[in-house]
Amino acid sequence: MDRRAFIGTLAGGLLAPPLAAEAQQAAGKVYRIGFLGPAAEGVYTDSLLSLSTGLRELGYVEGRNIVFEYRFAEDKYERLPDLAAELVRNKVDVIVVHSTPGTRAAKQATRTIPIVMVNVADPVGAGLVASLARPGGYITGVSNIDVGLAGKRLELLKEVLPKLSLVGVLRNPNNPSGELQFKETQAAARSLGIKSQLFDVRDRKELESAFSVMAKARADAFTVMGDPLFLSQQKHIANLATTTRLPSVFARNENVEAGGLMSYGPTFADQFRQAVTYVDKIFKGEKAGDLPVENPTRMYLVINLKTAKALGLTIPASLLLRADQVIE
């Protein structure tokens, strides 16, 4: 679904006869919600629909008492400061922002507008908030705890590949959380007796180069640090993995749906639904810095059996039984 169709859906199908709460909200202020996304616009279609649907359930309807301002960096992270500044100039009432790079740009752009971050790996380690329980300032939101999950993802690969000895690690060095995730991955690799090889990937060209080197080095598999770039490039990554016959584990289920082997972590839909509560509380007068940062409510293990069969892999029955979703 393209953005015009998405906006049309929100303006049409979601604008049903108002609930009592909606009528009450409509009589008052029209809130402006800014959204800042580092990735390609299409990455956020379902997530933004989840956000809008959740807000509607609380009485906020686009075109009636809320208005959205969307900004997408299309994987060009250097654009994020200007896009964040645009939202500030447009006097939005709250900024909902995806990822560590996006949140950092929003934080630099304003000291007064509340910021609700979504899908951030380590808000404290990245210097975005003082603590999870007491964020302080004007930022709150939802962590995906990717740093803490990096080791678990390697363990899952080891279950599928008992003889795993060399794993490629893809990270975007433009994301401050990438280094935090990599350190955790390194520590897990050492404890599992696995060698790791780091590849810094900032764009499509470096992505292709990484796969070329992994193939020549005879890597057994690869893992991907959570980053918006790898969502934008999900189909290309899946194609490269198929060509090089490399099993994979990801942070996001979208990568598995595109053809990757496995993922473990929270879903975008859940994270954006959690963000709805923050937006509502802020509109009702609560300060962002007083609202504790939440961790994910649930983790999902997703396995693509079609990909496993193409790679000649047998997924252990014990792992399949633990899977929340199996793609066949």
Image (cartoon, rainbow, N blue to C red):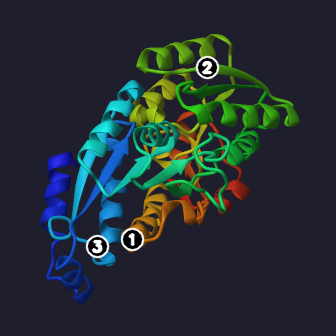
Q: Amino acid at mark 1?
A: Asp
Residue appearing at x 56%, y 39% in the figure: 226
Q: Quadrant of residue 232?
A: top left
- Confirm whether residue 39 shows in the render: yes
Callout 3 crowding tier (Cα within 10 Å): few <14, some 14–19, many ≥20? many
Q: Amino acid at mark 2?
A: Phe
Q: Identify residue for label 2.
A: 199
Q: Identify residue for label 3.
A: 56
Label 2: element kind: strand
Give coordinates of residue 234: x percent, y percent. 43, 35
Q: CA distance from mark 1 to mark 3?
A: 11 Å
Is 307 situated above or below 243? Answer: below
Q: Nearer the viewer, residue 259 or 92?
A: 92
Label 3: element kind: helix
Residue appearing at x 80%, y 37% in the figure: 188
Q: Amino acid at mark 3?
A: Arg
Residue appearing at x 48%, y 52% in the figure: 118
Q: Nearer the viewer, residue 107 or 221?
A: 107
Q: CA distance from mark 2 to mark 1?
A: 40 Å
- Residues marked 1 and 3 touching at CB (< 8 Å): no
Q: CA distance from mark 3 to mark 2?
A: 42 Å
Whether residue 290 sits left or right of residue 48 in the image: it is right
Callout 1 crowding tier (Cα within 10 Å): few <14, some 14–19, many ≥20? some
Label 1: element kind: helix
Give coordinates of residue 196: x percent, y percent. 74, 24
Q: Nearer the viewer, residue 294 or 252?
A: 294
Give coordinates of residue 64: x percent, y percent. 15, 70
Residue 280 is labelled as 1
Q: Nearer the observer, disc 2 or disc 1?
A: 1
